[in-house]
Amino acid sequence: MRHRGVTVGALVASVCGVSLDAVGPLLTRVAVDDAVRGITDVLVPVVVAILALATIRFGASFLRRYLAGRMALDVQHDLRRQVFAAVQRLDGQRQDQMRTGQVVSRAITDLQLVQSLLAMVPLAAGTVVLVVASVVAMLWLSPLLTVIALVMLPLAGFVTNRTRRTLFPATWSAQQRAADVAQQVEETVTGVRVVKGFGQEDREVATLERISRRLFAERMRAARMTARLNPTLLALPTLGQVAVIGVGGVLALNGSITIGTFLAFTTYVAQLVGPARLVGSLIVSAQLARAGVERVYDLVDTTSDVADPDDPEPLPDGPLGIELDAVSFGYTRRDPVLDGVSLTVAPGETLALVGGAGSGKSTVALLLPRFYDPQGGALRLGGVDLRRLRLADLRSELGVVFEEAFLFSDTIRANIAYARPGASEAEIRAAAEAAQVASFVESLPDGYDTLVGERGLTLSGGQRQRIALARAMLTAPRVLVLDDATSAVDTATEAAIHATLRELTAGRTTLLVAHRRSTLALADRIAVLDHGRVVDVGTEAELVARSPLFRSLLAADELLPAAETPVPVAVDGVTPSLWPESVTGSAGGSEGAVRAAAASGGGMRGSAGATAMVGGIPATPELLARVDALPPATEQPRLGNTDPTTPQDGARLVRILRPVRGLLTLGLVLVALDALTSLAFPTVARYAVDNGITARSAHAVLVATLLGIGLVAVAWFVVAAETLITSRTGESLLYSLRVRSYAHLQRLGLDYYERELSGRIMTRMTTDVDALSTFLQTGLTQAVVSLLTVVGVAVALLVTDPELALVALSVVPLLVVATIVFRRLSSHAYAEAREKVSAVNADMQENVSGVRVAQAFVREEHSAQAFGARSDAYRRSRLRAQRYIATYFPGVAYLSDIAQAAVLGVGAAR
């Protein structure tokens, strides 16, 4: 078990700190009973004991919060690296099935859910100990009252189990829709040039609106289920508290228990309300995290068909020959691309592949680096079957240049030296000269230190292609695989590159995929492919003389730059054979083009359906049946007359909140009612003591009991409505922000996308938007509850006893100072963490898109290390914020304990 020390430390600290809460009521009981009898000898020891326990509890709470946060962040960091490593291991078939937006969704949203749940686990464990210790103390105080108080627990278990069966499929389905939103954003941001080129911004905004409405409906369906669960879980222990007031009051009237015992018992029962709230929150979080964990591990546990052999063979020294022996292959078995292809490329020979669209030329180029394995026949390098070679050994001997060059968002120098980071400056410049890169780099202000932007899109297609060619040249491979490596350059540059290639290919085995006739001059022989078969092999002169197909290709200008698919190709430039299935979408035409163009140079492409390999967790028949059995998700966001797609001047918070101000106001009213009902229970208990037990009035005890029952009923409806309204407020705002931000993105010019990494854009559209929504759903309500509770308690204290109220409120100035300091420190820490997580997400998305380039140049491990370093930097930044949290909130509780001890000491001494 990894992180054992941190996990055990967090659990021990939680158990120690929370279990001390079980001792407090016993000390209060002693102090109250002795004070009632006029005995003050033990008052000072009791107050000192309370302060000592408060100090220990502060230390334990600090350790629990910090270590729990560290454990959760460590696990999130590990899972994030595992997701990254899993993507780097995927073979070509798995890459074709991959939906980049789904992977990004796992790396951002799902891992955040897991981290949030793990941070709660130590507290939950400590709460279990608190419940057990409280029950033991309650049994010691009064077995009868204990049975009455706990009779509701089996009912709570029944309700929880019943709701969980429907809550998980509801949250699972909602998370699929959230991933669909991420996929839509990722694809259209990546394919922004296609969107704008076809003028389809409005269509894409409408598509996101539709997906977001579906997400809203499904999340509100889950919220309705939660609105039935949470109020019930809160009401059951509160009913037990009311029963204790009634029965305990009668027992106190009869002298069976003391007033101190009664107060201690009601305190213990009140302590069970907190765990009930935690359990309710934990159940919802657990269902969300469970779906997230399954989605993450579905990707992490994915195995590739292309793998290293158990007993690999080495490649021979010297030039390597290539042999295709009756090779058959199809991206889908029902649609073969290569059908019994047999070819031999002698060591040091240059062979060109030509053919019409869909003939299988680029497929041969993809089989050589073993992105795929043939389904029939064998492919050999140096006489060794590729399946007998380690992937790293094979790919380190190949220099691959894809038709469409994929560059990373780094400098020109770093992109050229991608496969050889330790290359000298002279070697980098020599490769640049050979690929005709130097001719334009020297005119750039920063030269080789020029940042090329995401995927190199700040450069022209020809410039990107030349850098990619220089990248391959720098590796000095024994075998060159050039998939139309000069298709995007002008004829003069092409002639200069060809002159260099003649020198480079001399004595080096080279496979050329040719789209231009000029490229054929580099070849010793030419192989003509047609519908996956080799129809002729020979020199250009021989083929012109005897091959009708070759002559027709020349006559029809087929040997010109041309995509091999009717839709725009992906950034890796693979041919139509990689896209045997039509890209599905809700809209036709240009939307399909966007989906194809968004599938980037790593070989990713859209995959229809949530049950694609990594499109979602495997949807078992049982799970699908449970989803189908759910009530229909039909609720739609209501924003009044506000259209989130229209542009606005600025984005002030007041303007953003305007469409939901009615819901927000209603939610705050319900939160206030919730706080008031919570404050009313201690008042009811006080009424039972003062007017019932002390005054020896059974009628007053009955009135207190009936008031308690009424409060429970009111609280149930208030909490249910509060859950629904706060969820609707947050989800409506989330919908509005998401659509508004996306519509604004569609209005921005291409220069914005050249400056900003798509991963950072994804962070703004996911993490940042979710953070604001979460604040409105939970943070704002909790803040209001806390504020109202403080005000309510202060008013109650002032009304009850002004002198003791001043004693209790004496810690407020310290609390204000601590809050100001915490706000300043935590704001800076969270701002830094946000920037770092944006870098992590951008790196993840870029490497998912460029995974095939990383594999071709054996850079998977290096990429994983660089990504791990960025992820660790974010982890350390968040840990600093966690230290502030672990200090501040236990500090607030510590001040409360000090005030309690002071009130007890002063009050009992009077």
Image: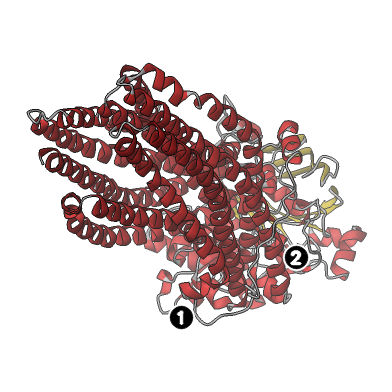
How many badges with numbers are in the image? 2
Is 400 drawn above or below residue 189 in the view shown? Answer: above
Which amino acid type is marked by label 1?
Ser
Q: Using the numbered discs, state the Cα–Cα distance from disc 1 to disc 2 in whole angstroms.
A: 38 Å
The answer to which of marks 1 and 2 sits earlier in the sequence is 1
Q: Nearer the viewer, residue 22 or 630?
A: 22
Q: Nearer the viewer, residue 530 or 617?
A: 617
Q: Answer left or right for 212 relative to 37.
A: right
Whether residue 302 is visible here, answered yes or no, is yes
Check the image and name the residue furthest to the bottom.
649
Q: Tell me the tag on residue 443.
A: 1
> Which residue corresponds to the image point at 50% horizontal and 42% vertical from the top-left?
710
Write down the quadrant of residue 571 in the picture.
Answer: bottom right
Question: Could you tell me residue 382's position as x and y percent?
Answer: 63, 38
Q: Which of 41 and 308 is in front in this view?
A: 41
Q: Of helix, strand and loop, which one carries label 1?
A: loop
Whether residue 462 is visible here, answered yes or no, is no
Question: Could you tell me residue 839's position as x and y percent?
Answer: 44, 58
Question: Which mark is in front, 1 or 2?
Answer: 2
Q: Answer left or right for 82 relative to 389.
A: left
Q: Tell me the tag on residue 661.
A: none
Quarter of the picture containing the C terminus is top left
Name the residue carrying label 2: 591
